[in-house]
Image (cartoon, helix red, strand yellow):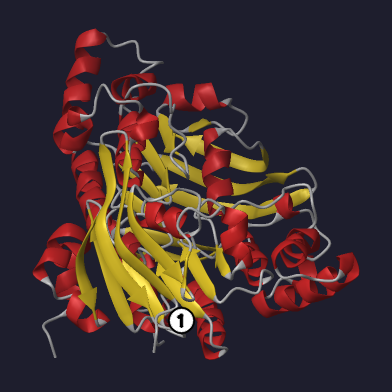
Amino acid sequence: MSEPLLRLEGVASGYGDVRVLWGVDLDVEPGEVVCLVGANGAGKSTLLRTVSGLVRATAGRVLFRGRDLARATPAEVLAAGIAQVPEGRRLFAAMSVRNNLLMGAYLRRDGAAAIQRDLELVYTVFPTLAERRRQDAGTLSGGEQQMCAIGRGFMSRPALLMIDELSLGLAPRLVERLGEALREINRAGISILLVEQDVMTAFELARRGFVLDAGRVTLHGPTSELARNPTVREAYMGLAP
Amino acid sequence: MSPLLELRCVSRAFGGLRALHDVSFALAPGEIVGLIGPNGAGKTTLVNLVTGVYRPTAGEIHFAGRRIDGRRPWQISRRGVARTFQIVQPFPRMTVLENVAAGALFAAGARGVEAAKAAAREHLAFVGLAGQAEAPAATLTLADRKRLELAKSLAMRPRLLLLDEVNAGLNPAEIEQALGLIRTLAARGLTILIIEHLMRVVMAVCSRLVVLHHGELIAEGRPGDVVRDPRVVEAYLGSRWAARAGPAP
């Protein structure tokens, strides 16, 4: 068995006096796509934000390639190889699409040529972004903004890309398109941790899944098994158990 | 029966960009109609035209037999048109109850603050937020903010409710609860236009779908027919969704 890329051990975190995560264990293998599902308020975004260093872990370890990042700053986490695509895209609205993508490469030290190659790769995966490269990101449609946010995350060349709410507010066809793009990004050697409300889509994209309920992991396993689990079907997929 | 809302050849341009072009359709009283289409197709622009945020550059909008295009948003809302916002817009420092009472005071003619608060409590109970009435709106979770949007718009006692992605960000189980609320409102006689990307929502509650693409109406009809229209599959649904839906019965 290979060493996990990311391993959370007993992670707790929250905001002020409000504790959101209660001893979460979770792992992502190198090259894997893993999804995290659960109700609103279960702590999915908080978990991503804790890994990113935006929310401080109050207990436990966040091991990435064996190194504990639980006390690391967001810049250190990004430099270590973890990028987050935040819920709501959070683009730099008054900057061009191209400059938004280049902001993703801000911490890279591997040279302009490598960055240019990855920029071209983003344009290949999302041709719309190439057409609109000089346009302000604020003028993009919702789907194009999500493409730009994913592209910006990719531009840091992370080992792990965390995506919060891939399909939020997007047309079915675009969700399908973004799913294909994630597979391409994954084939380029990047592991993915995906938070997604559309559980059906999440299970199609990910090999394994974790179910978070009230800040605790209640179930995990291959998505093919989770999709047959009566509790998951009823509580998270809206299907008959 | 004469329509409650009618759009006649409505267009809207922003500079050189045609956001909506020559769109006509009508809602009968009591109908639940779904408005679908790709991101950027003009759906929210249409809501902004009906609610008076923008004026059409051409065409007319009629509500309950009177022409409303060119009226101000507050005039249109007092005539009985309410909407929710895709990006939720509470007054963050006011309590949940005060947010809803504001709608009751402003548009529903509540007699004083106490009457407005009493009405607000009923709407909060209806959407399941009674327990959070005294909390500042900023502290609510996303799902609860969506419920607050609905309570705020109901407090205006509308005849027509425009729901702009009120279910986005909810998981399937939370969506089931929201569907229950929408059905109850429809049973009370409210006319509802639902803008939604979640096809399980529109398929479950709408009797008719209207499809916008590049600002133009490309399909209209029964949900089961519309989702099998090749133009709708191409522009909006994608082949995977169409494969899930299966062939026509």
| Residue A119, placed above or below residue B133 | above
Could you tell me residue A190's position as x and y percent? 28, 37
Residue A235 visible in this rendered orientation of the protein: no
In this orientation, which residue lies closer to the viewer: A126 or A24? A126
Q: Is residue B200 left or right of residue A8?
A: left
| Residue B185, placed above or below residue B84 | below
Residue A57's image quarter?
A: top right
In this orientation, which residue lies closer to the viewer: A62 or A228? A228
Element under disc 1: helix
- Type of amino acid under label 1: Glu
Could you tell me residue B24's position as x and y percent? 28, 66
At a point 25% along the width and 66% down the height, the residue shown is B211
Q: Dot 1 corresponds to which residue?
A: A234
In this orientation, which residue lies closer to the viewer: B26 or A183? B26
Could you tell me residue A138's position as x and y percent? 40, 32
In this orientation, which residue lies closer to the viewer: A239 or A226? A239
